[in-house]
Image (spheres, rainbow, N blue to C red):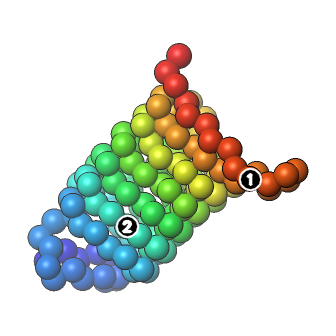
């Protein structure tokens, strides 16, 4: 059984059919301020989850999928996020400084006030809607230098 608690120790969600975070898939769960410190979330998936202010310090986030999640205010600084997806997620106020975001999918994510200082973005994909002008969309793939 997987028990997800917040930073104050309050139980947010219990998944009885899982024995580890890795590979876990959750949809529509409120995980605001969840404490994932040191957890292996490799290949886990979160869809339409509210995860505002969740703590990911020292977590393993290889190939994790955050699809249409609210991750506003989360700190991913100095983390290894290779292959992760933040597609359609709200990343308002997130910190990715010094993070390895190689091959990360940021398609349609909200990047308002996001800190990407010194982040590695080799091979990452960023698609976003154009808010002014003729509308439509743009796709940017960041290639290694």
Q: How many marks?
A: 2
Residue 59: x percent and y percent?
Answer: 31, 52
Left or right of 28? Residue 139 is right
| Mark 1 burial class by Cα count in 10 Å: few <14, some 14-19, many 20+ | few
Q: Which mark is residue 39?
A: none
**For residue 90, which quarter of the picture?**
bottom right
Depth order, front residue of 36/91: 91
Left or right of 5? Residue 51 is right
Q: In percent of the image, x 45 and y 63: which residue is there?
A: 67
Q: In percent of the image, x 42 and y 37: which residue is there?
A: 103
Element marked by disc 2: strand
Depth order, front residue of 55/125: 125
Residue 58: x percent and y percent?
Answer: 32, 49
Q: In percent of the image, x 43 and y 52: which residue is there?
A: 85
Depth order, front residue of 140/13: 140
Q: Which residue is mark 2?
A: 46
N-term-proximal mark, 1 vs 2:
2
**For residue 97, which quarter of the picture?**
top right
Distance in Å between CA atoms under marks 1 and 2: 27 Å
Q: Residue furthest top?
A: 145
Q: Which residue is mark 1?
A: 136
Residue 76: x percent and y percent?
Answer: 46, 49
The reply to whether residue 119 is visible in this rendering is: no
Depth order, front residue of 49/132: 132
């Amino acid at each position: 059984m997987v028990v997800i608690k917040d930073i104050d120790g309050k139980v947010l969600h219990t998944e009885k059919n899982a024995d580890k975070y890795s590979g876990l898939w959750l949809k529509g769960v409120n995980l605001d301020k969840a404490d994932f410190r040191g957890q292996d979330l490799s290949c886990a998936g979160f869809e339409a989850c509210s995860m505002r202010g969740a703590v990911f310090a020292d977590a393993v986030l290889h190939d994790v999928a955050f699809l249409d999640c609210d991750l506003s205010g989360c700190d991913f600084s100095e983390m290894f996020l290779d292959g992760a997806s933040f597609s359609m997620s709200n990343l308002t106020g997130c910190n990715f400084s010094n993070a390895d975001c190689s091959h990360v999918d940021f398609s349609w994510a909200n990047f308002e006030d996001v800190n990407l200082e010194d982040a590695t973005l080799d091979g990452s994909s960023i698609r976003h809607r154009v808010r002014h002008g003729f509308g439509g969309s743009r796709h940017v793939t960041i290639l290694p230098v």
